[in-house]
Image (cartoon, grey):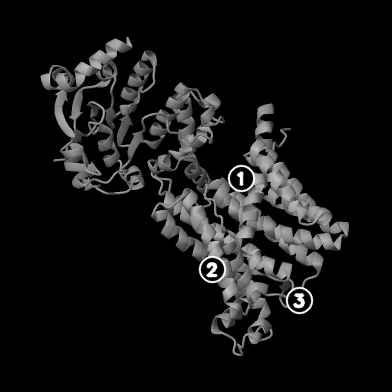
């Protein structure tokens, strides 16, 4: 019988999903809740990986797309019993029309996914057809994140300002709140679906062409490929997935604030990918999990000092494994034959 | 009567910040012809190729391909709709992708979002890629990254990508740069084999190579067409000898 030979990255994916799938059995409630949140980050990490890892577009404001989904969902959840409290405090007594439109959680899910996708698509059309790329794309998205945070802070009446929107109910299905375990497995299922979606898309010819664009932008044009159309398309898909992550984040985390969606969180995702490795989905997932879990453990031990340690680790990885941990591993496996 | 020309330009001009790189050029190529373009550095040969493939937009004048006005169209449209293929000066590959992926990227008419979104490369294209892999002798190395290949193998891969692309017009910009005499000769043979009913334009410096492949030669000088005709005629044209061939011959001697 022929043995099924899986590439190293696929084995790592399976191992990760196995650990995640079995984790609630440990009975560690606090950590189950924490890992549930980190699983949402996996979706966010993949949404950046298809954009940066595959197509070479480094979005330094990716959390804007995440935040749009998150805020849409948070607003919807906080408006379940009439005008949200933070709005009342600002003197709003009537439910605004746009809020009525997303009061149904399903509508919020839809808008929370489509709105960031639309923003990404428009931005892509605008930037990529005028040949804006490389570092300019990064700078523009970075400033977008800054503008988005400013907006959230200044429109306190609609966004809860600096404090954000809190006291959100957890995940519920058909009016029934889910228990922690149910909620965990709901997110786990979403993670698996998004993984399969990304894997299928990146294994299709679309993914092949994205890699081609990353490798040699000018050459691929002379092979008849409209690179701006591809970049716009992948940016929109990435926006939808980042939005979905945000939609899940609001109920799972119980609150959302400008800190969760600004430059800092965007940079965090970039660091996950840089350390884990880009362009394989595996590296993004491993990087996101590893850094968040380690960060949690180390901050218990060292407080704010752990950020300094993280900085040190980043320097080491960039120096010794610029392709990231998974990239380095894949190379080592290949060389061993 | 079908138009015998596949490509022609009408008083095509382009200037780069005041420097007139091409000045009212009327250049035309017959269907199925192998045309060689020669001329000193800065004569406007490569610029003309940039214009035909859409990378540079002309300041004035028009370009026609297959009866259509293609002036100002994007490179990807000229490559996909009009099937103009191009080999660059020096290797230009997808370095961190495998040899077969490089070939698959070159498969024609498959590179739109609609044709690729959640779709795999059609099996006909896959089979064609396999066929090309054995023709260019890289079947054994199909899983290797392009950057791991030797100089010669990279050249073959480029040629394989062109076969894969199956263009109507093939533009080869100095295909023998950096090659040994032996490799140059093999490339000449390959080009003749590649031609197979296609129209080919070769921009070249190496006169030995030109003698090997050329029938009709166009000589550029300072943004103009200085002369055009059969190779024997060109080699004895006193004007051409004065501005170009003399220095080339000197160059050949000093290289030898």
* Residues beneath discs 2 and 1 located on the same chain: yes
Ranked by sequence position, the earlier of labels 2 and 3 is 2
Q: Is residue A170 left or right of residue B215?
A: right
Residue B132, quarter of picture: top left
- Outermost right residue: A27
Please, what secondary structure does the residue beneath circle 2 have?
A: helix
Q: Quick one: A123 or B216, which is closer to the camera?
A: A123
Question: Which chain letter matches label 2?
Answer: A
Q: Are marks 2 and 1 in contact (CB under 8 Å)?
A: no
Task: Look at the image and tell me whether residue A227 can be seen.
Answer: yes
Q: Quick one: B31 or A43, which is closer to the camera?
A: A43
Q: Which mark is residue B43?
A: none
As drawn, B90 above or below A141: above
The residue where tag 1 is placed is: A278
Q: Are marks 1 and 3 in contact (CB under 8 Å)?
A: no
Tell me how far mark 2 sits from mark 1, CA to CA: 26 Å
Tell me how far mark 1 sits from mark 3, CA to CA: 39 Å
The residue where tag 2 is placed is: A115
Image spot of residue A328 (x, y percent): 66, 36
Say which of marks 1 and 3 sits in front.
1
The residue where tag 3 is placed is: A176
- Outermost bottom residue: A93
Ranked by sequence position, the earlier of labels 2 and 1 is 2
Image spot of residue A152 (x, y percent): 59, 72
Q: Residue at x 13, y 16 (%)?
A: B236
Label 3 Cα crowd, 10 Å radius (few <14 / some 14-19 / many 20+): few
Tell me how far mark 2 sits from mark 3, CA to CA: 27 Å
Q: Indicate the quadrant containing the N terminus of chain A: top left, top right, bottom left or bottom right.
A: top right
Q: Indicate the quadrant containing the C terminus of chain A: top left, top right, bottom left or bottom right.
A: top right
Q: Residue at x 76, y 66 (%)?
A: A183
Q: Quick one: B235 or B245, which is closer to the camera?
A: B245
């Amino acid at each position: 019988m022929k043995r099924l030979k899986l590439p190293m990255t696929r084995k790592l994916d399976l191992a990760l999903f196995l650990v995640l799938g079995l984790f609630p059995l440990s009975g560690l409630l606090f950590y189950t809740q924490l890992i549930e949140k980190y699983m949402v980050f996996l979706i966010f990490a993949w949404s950046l990986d298809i954009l940066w890892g595959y197509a070479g577009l480094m979005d330094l404001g990716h959390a804007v797309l995440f935040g749009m989904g998150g805020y849409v969902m948070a607003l919807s959840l906080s408006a379940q019993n009439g005008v949200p409290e933070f709005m009342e405090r600002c003197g709003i007594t009537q439910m605004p029309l746009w809020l009525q439109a997303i009061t149904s959680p399903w509508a919020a899910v839809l808008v929370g996914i489509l709105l960031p996708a639309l923003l990404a698509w428009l931005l892509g059309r605008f930037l990529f057809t005028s040949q804006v790329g490389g570092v300019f794309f990064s700078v523009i998205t970075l400033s977008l994140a800054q503008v988005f945070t400013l907006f959230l802070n200044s429109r306190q009446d609609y966004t809860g300002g600096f404090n954000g929107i809190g006291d959100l109910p957890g995940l519920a299905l058909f009016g029934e709140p889910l228990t922690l375990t149910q909620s965990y497995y709901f997110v786990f299922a979403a993670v698996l679906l998004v993984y399969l979606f990304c894997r299928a898309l990146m294994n299709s010819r679309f993914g092949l062409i994205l890699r081609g664009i990353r490798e040699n932008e000018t050459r691929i044009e002379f092979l008849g490929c409209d690179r701006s159309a591809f970049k716009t398309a992948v940016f929109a898909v990435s926006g939808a997935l980042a939005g979905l992550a945000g939609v899940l984040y609001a109920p799972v985390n119980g609150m959302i604030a400008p800190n969760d969606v600004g430059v800092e969180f965007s940079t965090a995702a970039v660091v996950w990918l840089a350390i884990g490795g880009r362009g394989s989905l595996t590296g993004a997932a491993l990087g996101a999990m590893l850094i968040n879990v380690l960060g949690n453990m180390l901050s218990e031990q060292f407080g704010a000092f752990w950020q300094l340690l993280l900085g040190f680790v980043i320097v080491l990885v960039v120096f010794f494994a610029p392709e990231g941990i998974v990239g380095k591993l894949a190379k080592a496996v290949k060389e061993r034959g | 009567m079908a138009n015998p020309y596949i490509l022609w330009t009408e008083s095509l001009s382009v200037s780069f910040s005041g420097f007139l790189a091409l000045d009212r050029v009327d250049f035309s190529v017959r269907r199925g012809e192998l045309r060689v373009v020669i001329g000193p550095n800065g004569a406007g040969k490569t610029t003309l190729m940039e214009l035909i493939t859409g990378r540079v937009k002309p300041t004035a004048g028009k370009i026609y391909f297959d009866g259509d006005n293609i002036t100002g169209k994007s490179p990807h449209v000229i490559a996909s709709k009009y099937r103009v293929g191009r080999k660059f000066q020096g290797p230009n590959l997808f370095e961190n992708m495998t040899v077969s992926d490089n070939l698959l990227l070159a498969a024609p008419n498959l590179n739109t979002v609609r044709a690729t979104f959640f779709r795999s490369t059609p099996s006909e294209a896959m089979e064609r890629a396999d066929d090309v892999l054995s023709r260019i002798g890289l079947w054994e190395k199909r899983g290797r990254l392009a950057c791991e290949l030797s100089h010669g193998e990279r050249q073959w891969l480029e040629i394989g990508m062109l076969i894969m692309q199956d263009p109507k017009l093939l533009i080869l910009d100095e295909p023998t740069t950096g090659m040994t005499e032996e490799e140059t000769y093999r490339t000449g043979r390959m080009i003749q084999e590649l031609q197979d009913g296609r129209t080919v334009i070769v921009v070249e410096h190496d006169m030995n190579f030109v003698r090997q492949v050329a029938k009709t030669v166009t000589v550029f000088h300072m943004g103009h067409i200085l002369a055009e005709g059969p190779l024997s005629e060109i080699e004895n044209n006193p004007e051409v000898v004065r501005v170009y061939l003399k220095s080339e011959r000197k160059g050949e001697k000093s290289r030898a």
